[in-house]
Image (cartoon, grey):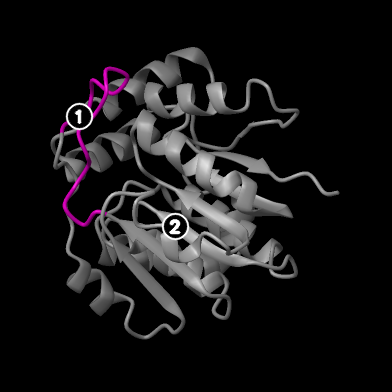
Amino acid sequence: MHQPGKKVLRRIASIGFMRPVRRFAIQAFERASNMQLIPASFDDDRQLSDLIKRISQERDTLLSNVEGAQIYRTVRALAKIPGHIAEVGVYRGASSRIIREAEPGKPFHLFDTFEGLPKPSGNDEAFYEGAYKSSLEDVKGYLKPYQNLHFYKGLFPETAEPVREVRFSFVHLDVDLYESTLSGLDFFWPRLTPGGALISHDYSSSPGVSRAFDEFFSDRNVAVFPLAYTQCMVVKPGV
Protein backbone atom coordinates (compact mmCIF):
# COMPACT_ATOMS: atom_id res chain seq x y z
CA MET A 1 0.00 0.00 0.00
CA HIS A 2 1.30 3.46 -0.78
CA GLN A 3 2.40 5.68 2.10
CA PRO A 4 -0.61 8.09 2.12
CA GLY A 5 -2.92 5.09 2.38
CA LYS A 6 -0.97 3.75 5.35
CA LYS A 7 -1.19 7.12 7.07
CA VAL A 8 -4.96 7.21 6.63
CA LEU A 9 -5.33 3.69 8.03
CA ARG A 10 -3.17 4.54 11.04
CA ARG A 11 -5.36 7.56 11.66
CA ILE A 12 -8.47 5.40 11.45
CA ALA A 13 -6.87 2.94 13.89
CA SER A 14 -6.54 5.77 16.39
CA ILE A 15 -10.34 5.81 16.73
CA GLY A 16 -9.88 3.16 19.36
CA PHE A 17 -12.90 3.98 21.49
CA MET A 18 -15.62 2.99 19.05
CA ARG A 19 -15.04 -0.12 16.93
CA PRO A 20 -18.21 0.32 14.80
CA VAL A 21 -17.10 3.87 13.99
CA ARG A 22 -13.70 2.56 12.96
CA ARG A 23 -15.27 0.03 10.59
CA PHE A 24 -17.52 2.70 9.07
CA ALA A 25 -14.49 4.96 8.57
CA ILE A 26 -12.52 2.15 6.95
CA GLN A 27 -15.33 1.35 4.54
CA ALA A 28 -15.68 5.02 3.65
CA PHE A 29 -11.93 5.21 2.99
CA GLU A 30 -12.09 2.16 0.74
CA ARG A 31 -14.92 3.68 -1.30
CA ALA A 32 -13.11 6.99 -1.66
CA SER A 33 -9.68 5.54 -2.50
CA ASN A 34 -8.39 3.34 -5.27
CA MET A 35 -8.46 0.31 -2.98
CA GLN A 36 -10.77 -2.41 -4.26
CA LEU A 37 -12.78 -3.92 -1.41
CA ILE A 38 -13.60 -7.17 -3.18
CA PRO A 39 -11.19 -8.17 -5.98
CA ALA A 40 -12.72 -9.91 -8.96
CA SER A 41 -11.11 -13.21 -8.01
CA PHE A 42 -12.94 -13.06 -4.67
CA ASP A 43 -16.24 -11.78 -6.04
CA ASP A 44 -16.25 -14.52 -8.66
CA ASP A 45 -16.22 -17.07 -5.82
CA ARG A 46 -19.84 -16.37 -5.03
CA GLN A 47 -20.14 -18.90 -2.21
CA LEU A 48 -17.16 -17.47 -0.32
CA SER A 49 -18.21 -13.89 -1.08
CA ASP A 50 -21.70 -14.52 0.29
CA LEU A 51 -20.33 -16.25 3.41
CA ILE A 52 -17.97 -13.38 4.28
CA LYS A 53 -20.59 -10.71 3.65
CA ARG A 54 -23.17 -12.57 5.73
CA ILE A 55 -20.81 -12.96 8.69
CA SER A 56 -19.81 -9.29 8.55
CA GLN A 57 -23.48 -8.36 8.71
CA GLU A 58 -24.15 -10.71 11.63
CA ARG A 59 -21.25 -9.68 13.85
CA ASP A 60 -19.32 -6.51 14.61
CA THR A 61 -15.85 -6.90 13.11
CA LEU A 62 -13.00 -4.79 11.80
CA LEU A 63 -12.02 -7.36 9.19
CA SER A 64 -12.63 -6.20 5.65
CA ASN A 65 -14.24 -8.71 3.31
CA VAL A 66 -10.87 -9.23 1.62
CA GLU A 67 -9.18 -9.96 4.95
CA GLY A 68 -11.87 -12.48 5.80
CA ALA A 69 -11.31 -14.17 2.46
CA GLN A 70 -7.53 -14.22 2.99
CA ILE A 71 -8.00 -16.01 6.31
CA TYR A 72 -10.45 -18.49 4.79
CA ARG A 73 -8.25 -19.35 1.81
CA THR A 74 -5.11 -19.67 3.93
CA VAL A 75 -6.80 -22.08 6.33
CA ARG A 76 -8.12 -24.14 3.41
CA ALA A 77 -4.68 -24.22 1.81
CA LEU A 78 -3.22 -25.59 5.07
CA ALA A 79 -5.71 -28.45 5.34
CA LYS A 80 -3.01 -31.09 4.77
CA ILE A 81 -0.55 -29.54 7.21
CA PRO A 82 -0.81 -31.37 10.56
CA GLY A 83 -1.63 -29.41 13.69
CA HIS A 84 -4.38 -27.65 15.59
CA ILE A 85 -5.72 -24.14 14.90
CA ALA A 86 -5.70 -21.17 17.26
CA GLU A 87 -6.98 -17.62 17.42
CA VAL A 88 -5.94 -14.98 19.94
CA GLY A 89 -8.31 -12.03 19.92
CA VAL A 90 -11.72 -13.56 19.29
CA TYR A 91 -13.81 -10.44 20.00
CA ARG A 92 -17.36 -11.38 18.86
CA GLY A 93 -16.46 -14.48 16.87
CA ALA A 94 -16.68 -13.31 13.24
CA SER A 95 -13.18 -14.40 12.25
CA SER A 96 -13.59 -17.54 14.37
CA ARG A 97 -16.56 -18.55 12.26
CA ILE A 98 -14.67 -17.87 9.04
CA ILE A 99 -11.85 -20.10 10.25
CA ARG A 100 -14.27 -22.84 11.30
CA GLU A 101 -16.10 -22.74 7.98
CA ALA A 102 -12.76 -23.16 6.22
CA GLU A 103 -11.59 -26.03 8.46
CA PRO A 104 -14.40 -27.83 10.31
CA GLY A 105 -12.39 -30.73 11.68
CA LYS A 106 -9.16 -29.71 13.39
CA PRO A 107 -9.23 -28.80 17.10
CA PHE A 108 -9.70 -25.03 17.35
CA HIS A 109 -8.43 -23.08 20.39
CA LEU A 110 -9.90 -19.61 21.00
CA PHE A 111 -8.20 -17.17 23.40
CA ASP A 112 -9.57 -13.82 24.58
CA THR A 113 -9.88 -11.89 27.82
CA PHE A 114 -13.56 -11.33 26.96
CA GLU A 115 -13.13 -8.21 29.09
CA GLY A 116 -11.50 -5.98 26.49
CA LEU A 117 -7.90 -5.04 25.85
CA PRO A 118 -5.31 -5.23 28.64
CA LYS A 119 -3.48 -2.06 29.62
CA PRO A 120 -1.62 -0.73 26.57
CA SER A 121 2.09 0.08 26.63
CA GLY A 122 3.72 3.24 25.35
CA ASN A 123 3.73 1.67 21.88
CA ASP A 124 -0.08 1.64 21.74
CA GLU A 125 -1.22 5.21 22.25
CA ALA A 126 -4.34 4.77 20.10
CA PHE A 127 -5.86 2.18 22.44
CA TYR A 128 -7.17 2.05 25.99
CA GLU A 129 -7.71 -0.65 28.59
CA GLY A 130 -11.06 -2.40 28.27
CA ALA A 131 -11.68 -1.53 24.62
CA TYR A 132 -13.45 -4.14 22.46
CA LYS A 133 -15.05 -5.96 25.36
CA SER A 134 -17.09 -8.99 24.38
CA SER A 135 -18.94 -11.85 26.04
CA LEU A 136 -17.75 -15.43 26.21
CA GLU A 137 -21.33 -16.65 26.50
CA ASP A 138 -22.37 -14.62 23.46
CA VAL A 139 -19.49 -15.98 21.35
CA LYS A 140 -20.17 -19.54 22.47
CA GLY A 141 -23.79 -19.08 21.46
CA TYR A 142 -22.83 -17.72 18.05
CA LEU A 143 -20.43 -20.61 17.40
CA LYS A 144 -22.69 -23.27 18.89
CA PRO A 145 -23.25 -25.09 15.55
CA TYR A 146 -19.54 -25.96 15.34
CA GLN A 147 -17.66 -28.79 17.02
CA ASN A 148 -14.23 -29.25 18.63
CA LEU A 149 -13.93 -25.67 19.90
CA HIS A 150 -11.93 -24.91 23.06
CA PHE A 151 -12.34 -21.53 24.78
CA TYR A 152 -9.83 -19.88 27.13
CA LYS A 153 -10.88 -16.77 29.00
CA GLY A 154 -8.18 -14.55 30.44
CA LEU A 155 -4.93 -12.84 29.55
CA PHE A 156 -2.80 -14.71 27.04
CA PRO A 157 -0.32 -16.42 27.43
CA GLU A 158 -1.34 -17.09 31.03
CA THR A 159 -4.26 -19.10 29.62
CA ALA A 160 -2.09 -21.14 27.24
CA GLU A 161 -0.88 -23.82 29.67
CA PRO A 162 -3.35 -26.47 28.35
CA VAL A 163 -1.88 -26.21 24.82
CA ARG A 164 1.81 -25.98 25.67
CA GLU A 165 2.52 -29.37 24.07
CA VAL A 166 0.24 -28.78 21.05
CA ARG A 167 1.48 -28.09 17.52
CA PHE A 168 -0.42 -25.73 15.21
CA SER A 169 -0.92 -25.51 11.47
CA PHE A 170 -2.59 -22.07 11.54
CA VAL A 171 -2.76 -19.19 14.03
CA HIS A 172 -4.70 -15.94 13.76
CA LEU A 173 -3.63 -12.98 15.91
CA ASP A 174 -5.94 -9.98 16.29
CA VAL A 175 -4.76 -8.40 19.52
CA ASP A 176 -4.03 -4.76 18.52
CA LEU A 177 -1.23 -4.20 21.04
CA TYR A 178 2.56 -4.52 21.03
CA GLU A 179 2.98 -6.71 24.13
CA SER A 180 0.07 -8.99 23.20
CA THR A 181 1.41 -9.47 19.67
CA LEU A 182 4.91 -10.19 20.94
CA SER A 183 3.52 -12.71 23.43
CA GLY A 184 1.55 -14.42 20.68
CA LEU A 185 4.58 -14.71 18.42
CA ASP A 186 6.80 -15.91 21.25
CA PHE A 187 4.34 -18.67 22.18
CA PHE A 188 3.13 -19.87 18.79
CA TRP A 189 6.17 -19.57 16.53
CA PRO A 190 8.07 -22.47 18.17
CA ARG A 191 4.86 -24.52 18.13
CA LEU A 192 3.94 -23.86 14.49
CA THR A 193 4.27 -26.94 12.29
CA PRO A 194 6.75 -26.59 9.42
CA GLY A 195 4.68 -25.37 6.49
CA GLY A 196 2.12 -23.82 8.82
CA ALA A 197 1.23 -20.12 8.80
CA LEU A 198 0.36 -17.27 11.13
CA ILE A 199 -1.75 -14.29 10.03
CA SER A 200 -2.01 -11.09 12.06
CA HIS A 201 -4.47 -8.25 11.74
CA ASP A 202 -3.42 -4.56 12.08
CA TYR A 203 0.15 -5.04 10.87
CA SER A 204 0.04 -1.94 8.64
CA SER A 205 -2.30 0.12 10.81
CA SER A 206 -1.08 -0.42 14.38
CA PRO A 207 2.51 0.71 15.18
CA GLY A 208 2.66 -1.66 18.15
CA VAL A 209 1.81 -4.70 16.03
CA SER A 210 4.31 -3.87 13.29
CA ARG A 211 7.02 -3.17 15.89
CA ALA A 212 6.41 -6.54 17.55
CA PHE A 213 6.81 -8.35 14.22
CA ASP A 214 9.90 -6.35 13.28
CA GLU A 215 11.57 -7.09 16.63
CA PHE A 216 10.61 -10.75 16.81
CA PHE A 217 11.78 -11.64 13.31
CA SER A 218 14.80 -9.29 13.20
CA ASP A 219 17.24 -12.13 13.93
CA ARG A 220 15.28 -14.92 12.23
CA ASN A 221 15.66 -15.83 8.58
CA VAL A 222 11.91 -15.52 7.98
CA ALA A 223 10.01 -13.15 5.69
CA VAL A 224 7.01 -11.20 6.98
CA PHE A 225 4.59 -10.94 4.04
CA PRO A 226 2.32 -7.87 4.06
CA LEU A 227 -1.09 -8.89 2.69
CA ALA A 228 -3.87 -6.83 1.18
CA TYR A 229 -5.28 -4.24 3.55
CA THR A 230 -3.76 -4.43 7.09
CA GLN A 231 -2.82 -8.10 7.50
CA CYS A 232 0.54 -9.85 7.35
CA MET A 233 1.55 -13.50 7.21
CA VAL A 234 4.57 -15.57 8.19
CA VAL A 235 5.13 -19.18 7.12
CA LYS A 236 7.16 -21.64 9.18
CA PRO A 237 10.05 -22.95 7.06
CA GLY A 238 10.13 -26.68 6.44
CA VAL A 239 12.87 -28.90 7.77
Crowd rating for badge 1 (residues with CA inside 10 Å; few <14, some 14–19, many 20+): some
Q: Please, what secondary structure does the residue beneath circle 1 have?
A: loop
Against 66, residue 35 (above or below) is above
Instruction: Give the percent coordinates (x, y) of residue 164.
Output: 52, 59
Q: x, y (%) of residue 126?
A: 23, 24
The answer to whether any part of residue 210 appears in the image is yes
**Residue 135 placement (x, y as % from top left):** 17, 64
Region of the chain picked out in magenta, as a range: 113-128
Q: The residue tagged with tag 2: helix, strand or loop?
A: strand
Question: Which mark is in front, 1 or 2?
Answer: 2
Is 136 within the magenta? no
Please indicate whether residue 138 sits to the left or right of residue 91 in the image. Answer: left
Classify the position of the N terminus by image quarter: top right
Residue placed under numbered mark 2 in the picture: 87
Residue labelled with disc 1: 15
Residue 126 lies in the magenta-colored region: yes
The amino acid beneath tag 2 is Glu
116 vs 47: above or below: above
